[in-house]
């Protein structure tokens, strides 16, 4: 997995963890954050599945 993607996922999970909402909403927020970062950094060939997997990995690491 892309190291930059892992970093974005860790940041996203940390930020969304502060929200007082459902886990599903937290994951959607994290996904949106990562997608924004992927676009800003012109990362190529990052699939939605890879983003989902990175979020799950980061969540388990918390």
Image (tube, rainbow, N blue to C red):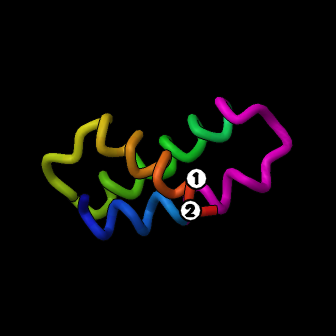
Q: Is label 1 in a helix, a strand or a loop? A: helix
Quadrant holding the C terminus: bottom right
Label placed on residue 59: 1
Q: Is the magenta stretch mostly helix, strand or loop?
A: helix
* Residue 20, quarter of the rendered image: top right
Residue under the point 28% across and 63% down = 41
Is residue 14 in the magenta section?
yes
User: Which residue matches tag 2?
Assistant: 61
Mark linked to residue 6: none
**Left or right side of 51 for 14:** right
User: Helix, strand, or loop for circle 2?
Assistant: loop
Displayed quadrant of residue 12: bottom right
Q: Residue at x 59, y 39 (%)?
A: 27
Image coordinates of residue 3 in percent, x first then y, are 29, 69
Q: Residue 49, how many percent across, how many down? A: 31, 35
In the image as oriented, which residue stretches furthest toward the front?
60
Magenta-highlighted residues: 11-24
Give residue 17's position: percent from left, percent from top: 72, 53
Please say whether residue 42 is one of the residues in the magenta stretch. Answer: no
Check if mark 2's residue and mark 1's residue have beta carbons within 8 Å: yes
Question: Which corner quadrant holds the N terminus?
Answer: bottom left
| Left or right of 42 in this view: 14 | right
User: Which of 1/42 is in front?
Assistant: 1
Q: Position of residue 45 (x, y in %)?
A: 14, 47
């Amino acid at each position: 997995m892309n190291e930059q993607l892992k970093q974005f996922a860790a940041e996203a999970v940390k930020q969304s963890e502060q929200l007082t909402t459902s886990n599903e909403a937290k994951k959607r927020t994290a996904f949106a954050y990562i997608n924004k970062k992927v676009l800003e950094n012109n990362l190529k060939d990052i699939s939605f599945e890879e983003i989902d997997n990175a979020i799950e990995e980061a969540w388990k690491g918390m």
